Image: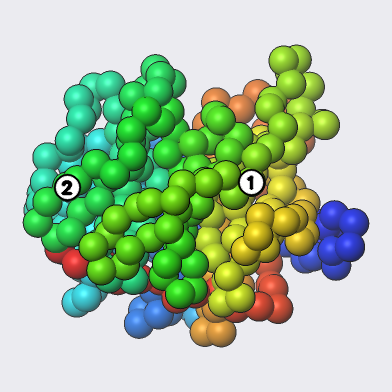
């Protein structure tokens, strides 16, 4: 499938992986040692892995909704689920809980997150009632510490190539913030607005809606790529927050991009179909699929977590 980008952007070929659709796909990352793409289906309580070289797809059923995952050395994964932080072994499907959830798990769950260059896992939460009671937490291998509060839906976590800027979004606010990041201490300071987007129209008409910021990734030049939920597009923003290009997608609800492939120039994008109108799903059969496209600037490699 070929779709046109925004003015000034080249026409971009977008295709989908040959895997079953997720209800709410999220947290994709490219594993450089396994040459495989991992992602989760939050609503489907599942972990997925796809190997492009031979087309192998694996799925693991989980006992609670996974919000985000990060690779650990030795073929293991660090997984933030509604019921806490877990070390997961894909080879045996065995899990061991490392920490209980730092919130009431009947009211909140973990959402978007990833490891920083030092191996700490940063994982945001989402409030089930969509109240501003969520936050952003950091796991240093021993302790979970809250770093932000008064959020509704934590998303958009990413780090600049030099490791001194942390990006983070509160999706319903239609805003992405940037923070000065101390990579040694893991401290945040200097909060500022990186990008602000127009609010969702009060009507159900979405054709003119640009979407709200969901998951994100950063490329080797420091550009920030963000999936615009309900906006049917992937945005590339410069380090100054300026829009560089808008890539149209064949589904209404992209959720998160990541860079993968041997050259890190393939962008994989998870998407959602859970809760979408029947007419929309009929018109967009790729909803819930993992999309892919090629870009000219490579992304940053995934950071391995410590646990």
Q: Which of 169 and 45 is in front in this view?
A: 169
Q: Quadrant of residue 277?
A: top right
| Quarter the N terminus occupies | bottom right
Q: Mark 1 points at which residue?
A: 195
Q: How crowded is mark 2: few (under 14 residues within 10 Å), some or many (20 or more)?
A: many
Secondary structure, mark 2, is: strand
Residue placed under numbered mark 2 in the picture: 144
Q: What element carries label 1?
A: strand
Mark 1: few, some, or many residues within 10 Å (few <14, many ≥20)? some
Residue 89: x and y, percent?
19, 63
| Residue 83 percent across, percent down from the top left | 19, 37
Residue for point 40% across, 46% down: 112
Q: Point out the tag, 2 or 1, that comes first from the N-terminus.
A: 2
Q: Is residue 61 visible?
A: no
Question: Quick check: 274 left or right of 284?
Answer: left
User: Could you say which is closer to the camera, residue 118 or residue 53?
Assistant: 118
Q: Quadrant of the C terminus?
A: bottom left
**Residues tagged 2 and 1 counted as in contact (Cβ below 8 A):** no
Relative to the observer, which residue lies in front, 157 or 128?
Answer: 157
Left or right: 244, with 281 as reference point: right
What residue is shown at x 40% (from left), y 35% (from top)?
43
Disc 2/disc 1 C-alpha distance (Å): 28 Å
| Residue 74, above or below 165 | below
């Amino acid at each position: 499938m070929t779709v046109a980008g925004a003015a000034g952007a080249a026409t971009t070929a977008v295709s989908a992986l040959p895997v079953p659709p997720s209800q709410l796909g999220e947290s994709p990352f490219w594993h450089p040692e396994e040459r495989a793409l991992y992602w989760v289906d939050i609503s489907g309580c599942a972990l997925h892995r796809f190997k492009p070289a031979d087309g192998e797809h694996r799925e693991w059923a989980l006992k609670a909704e996974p919000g985000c995952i990060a690779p650990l050395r030795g073929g293991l994964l660090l997984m933030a689920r509604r019921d806490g932080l877990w070390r997961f072994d894909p080879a045996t499907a065995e899990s061991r809980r490392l920490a209980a959830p730092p919130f009431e798990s009947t009211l909140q769950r973990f959402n978007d997150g990833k490891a920083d260059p030092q191996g700490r896992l940063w994982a945001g939460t989402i409030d089930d009632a969509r109240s501003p009671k969520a936050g952003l937490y950091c796991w240093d291998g021993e302790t979970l510490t809250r770093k932000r509060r008064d959020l509704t839906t934590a998303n958009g976590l990413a780090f600049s190539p030099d490791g001194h800027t942390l990006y983070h979004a509160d999706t319903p606010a239609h805003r992405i913030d940037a923070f000065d990041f101390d990579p040694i201490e893991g401290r945040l300071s200097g909060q500022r607005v990186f990008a602000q987007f127009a609010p969702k129209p009060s009507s159900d008409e979405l054709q003119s809606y640009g979407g709200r910021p969901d998951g994100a990734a950063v490329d080797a030049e420091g550009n920030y790529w963000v999936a615009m939920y309900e906006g049917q597009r992937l945005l590339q923003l410069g380090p100054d927050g300026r829009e560089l290009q808008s890539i149209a997608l064949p589904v209404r609800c992209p959720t998160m991009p990541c860079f993968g492939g041997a050259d890190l120039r393939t962008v994989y994008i998870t998407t959602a179909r859970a809760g979408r109108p029947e007419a929309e799903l009929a018109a967009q059969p790729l909803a819930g699929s993992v999309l892919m496209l090629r870009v000219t600037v490579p992304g940053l490699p995934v950071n391995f977590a410590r646990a």
